[in-house]
Image: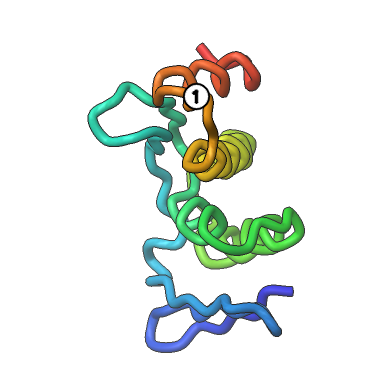
């Protein structure tokens, strides 16, 4: 369970027994952004109106869906008028984590895929334009 408190206009988040502790400015917790999946300088995959903080918090460490759902309710508590597309956010989270996983596999693979091939596989798998 994500524990959260508001102190000095910062939302303090933590998860017991996990290396997970973050402080997010309360006025920015509901910020929606355009997220690009892929290496810098490539077209990549672009998903719009997603939760900046969900991607930042859950693509590096904890990716348990219950924590993402708890974070979503925390965002609604502190930024009830946010314009985050939560369906797109979950899609972006899933794709980003798979992209990261595929990059790790590529390091030790004999048959390396190019960046464009990885992006193409993900676009086809998730039926993206």
From the viewer's perspective, is 20 left or right of 40?
A: right
Residue 70 in sight in this render: yes
Q: Nearer the viewer, residue 26 or 50?
A: 50
CA neighbours of label 1 inside 10 A, class few (<14), some (14 to 19), many (20+): some
Q: Residue at x 61, y 66 (%)?
A: 74
In the image, residue 3 lies at what x, y percent?
65, 80
Which image quarter: residue 77? bottom right
In the image, residue 108 lies at what x, y percent?
52, 42
From the viewer's perspective, is 35 left or right of 77?
A: left
Q: Residue at x 61, y 35 (%)?
A: 91
Viewport quadrant of the N terminus: bottom right
Q: Nearer the viewer, residue 61 or 72?
A: 61
Examine the rendered structure and indicate whether residue 121 appears above or below residue 86. above
What SS does tag 1 mark? Answer: helix
In the image, residue 121 lies at what x, y percent?
56, 19
Disc 1 target residue: 118
In the image, residue 115 lies at what x, y percent?
40, 25
Q: Residue at x 52, y 79 (%)?
A: 21
């Amino acid at each position: 369970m994500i524990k959260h408190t508001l102190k000095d206009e910062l939302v303090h988040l933590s998860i017991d027994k996990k290396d997970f502790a973050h402080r997010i400015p309360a006025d920015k917790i509901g910020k929606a952004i355009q997220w690009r999946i892929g290496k810098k300088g490539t077209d990549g995959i672009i998903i719009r109106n997603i939760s900046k903080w969900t991607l930042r918090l859950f693509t590096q460490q904890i990716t348990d869906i219950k924590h993402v759902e708890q974070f979503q309710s925390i965002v609604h508590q502190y930024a009830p008028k946010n314009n985050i597309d939560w369906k797109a956010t979950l899609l972006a989270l899933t794709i980003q984590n798979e992209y990261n996983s595929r990059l790790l596999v590529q390091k030790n693979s004999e048959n390396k895929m190019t960046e464009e091939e990885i992006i193409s596989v993900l676009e086809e798998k998730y039926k993206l334009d």
